[in-house]
Structures are given as structure tokens and as C-alpha cells.
Image (cartoon, rainbow, N blue to C red):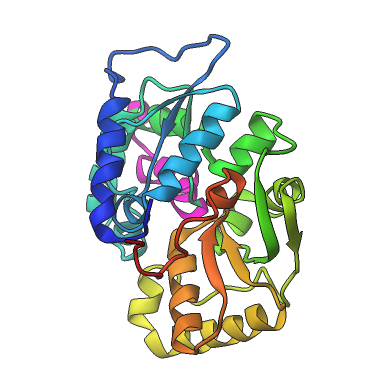
Amino acid sequence: MSPSVSSAFHLSAYVESFQVALSQAAPSHGPRPRVGLFATCLVDLIRPSVGFAAAKLIEDAGCEVVVPSQTCCGQPAFNSGDRRTARDLALQIMDAFRGVDYLVAPSGSCAGQIKKHFPELFAGEPELARRADALAARTFELISFLVDVRGVTSVKARFDGAVTYHDSCAGLRELGIKGQPRRLLDSVEGLTVSEMKDPDVCCGFGGTFAVKYGEISGAIVAKKADNISASNAGTLLAGDLGCLMNMAGKLQRLGRPVKARHVAEVLAGMGDEPAIGEPERR
């Protein structure tokens, strides 16, 4: 799967192939948990290969994957103070994922919005607050779900070369994701992790922050690009596509020969696709 926008329709086909009547269904409670994949806007529109990689990893962990019809998690509206829109989007997600055992997203940012901020949106409304709390309790970022919930300790994948890993702010600070991706990367044949300086420092993206404070964002990502290059790794990995797009764009503008990929793609053995920002193969 290529990273081009036109490829987004392939993920829509994937959604249709796994569509279920989740609003009436009850959680499975069986030997194979039913996991609702929250694809995220950026994965759907920009890099659907991450969605396929996430689905493969979840299925390999012994789960059934379903992809309900879905919309934005509402984080841009929430962070901009538009709580009404954020609340409306949250209600749609709460309805769509009602019948799953877990909601899993290949993004700490989106998972953090659902897990940490949905309950805040419905404080003081007992029934909706109960539903928001219930969904929050079964919402996880992809790699955290694999390691912390399903107990995955290794993957069957190969990737030749050195990688460096960026800890995205939301995943690290809201969800405590730090060692989990590195633990799984250590099991990938041919791969070595070369840590950059300050891997847990912001890349400067921050969603709407990069739009509101472009100069500050640019200065932050420039320093991050220097640290990435100094690691001597040929590939940059992270768990949030927004951060990856921001860093990949800066690296390319600086002429740095570092490829950027979502960690799920490497863990799923899909690391031979064009990197983020590279042209589609013909």
C-alpha cells in the first residue's frame, strides 16, 4: 500500500469488508476478543497501509478485527475550544464502538483523546458519562494494547537496518507508552535501535499548534531533525502519523536521507513499502 491520498479508498473497502452491526451487538467475551479498529483521519486519508498493518498485528494477537463506520476523534475541535463539535463527534464514536471489547487506535494522540478527554466532555451527564467512562476503559493505543493487554513479547518480522524511535507526546505523557514499542522492535530480525538524543522531546507538530505557532513549530522540528540525523539511523519510527509527517517533511526539505515509517508497518513486516512522503511505485 502506498502513502498517496488516492490509496485511502482501499481502507474504505477494508472497512466495508469487516462491517458489523455493532450498535446492537454485545461484547464477545469469547476466546477471541472483538477489537474495533479506530483507523484515524490521517491513516485513512494519507497512509492507509498503517491501518492494514494495525489490523494484521491485532489479528496476530488472537483477536477479531472489525472496523466500524467512524469519524474524527474530535481532538482538533477539543484543543481549539470547540467543545460542542468535540462532543458531537464523541457521541458518534461512542455509538459506533458500543459493541466491541476494545477500541484500538494506531495513534497515541487519538487514543488519548478518547481515553482521557471523552469522560471530561460528558461530566455532569450521568448516563453519557457512564458510557464515556466505559469506552475509555477499553480504549488503547495499538502497541500498548499488544504488549500490555495481549501480552505480546515478539513479532515475526524482518527489517534490515538501524532505526531510531521518536516518543510522541500524547502516547508518552497521557498513556505511558515508552518501552512497549522498543520491546517489540528488539524482536524484529535484522533491526537495530539507535536512540536519538532526546527521543521524548516534542517534534513541534502538536496538531493545531503547528498551524497557530508555525515559527516555533519549525524551530522545534529543526532541532528534532538534527537529533534524528545524528543517530545515524536510516529509518525514523514513531507511533503517530501526524508527528511522522511533520518530521519526514522537515528531513526531506533539509535533504537528509532518513526514511520515516509508522512503527506498526515495521512490526507487521510491511517495511518494504515506500516511506512517508516518497512517491508511489509504478
Asked if residue 176 shows in the view, the reply is yes
Q: In the displayed structure, would residue 118 be above or below residue 208?
A: above
Quick check: is 164 in the magenta stretch? no
Q: Nearer the viewer, residue 237 or 233?
A: 233
Judged from this view, the residue extending furthest toward the front is: 282
Q: Position of residue 160 (x, y in %)?
A: 68, 59
Which residue is found at the position 28% from the left and 55% from the top? Answer: 45
Q: Position of residue 197 (x, y in %)?
A: 73, 77
Q: Quadrant of the C terminus?
A: bottom left
Q: Nearer the viewer, residue 133 or 219?
A: 219
Q: Is residue 248 left or right of residue 43?
A: right
Which residue is found at the position 23% from the left and 43% from the top? Answer: 88
Q: Is residue 158 left or right of residue 65?
A: right
Q: Nearer the viewer, residue 192 or 72?
A: 192
Q: Position of residue 78 (x, y in %)?
A: 34, 57
Q: Position of residue 166 (x, y in %)?
A: 62, 66
Q: Bounds of the magenta span? A: 108-127
Q: In the displayed structure, would residue 108 be above or below residue 237?
A: above
Q: Main secondary structure of the magenta part?
A: helix
Q: Is residue 34 left or right of residue 152?
A: left
Which residue is found at the position 51% from the left and 35% from the top? Answer: 56
Quick check: is 126 in the magenta stretch? yes
Q: In the displayed structure, would residue 205 be above or below residue 85?
A: below
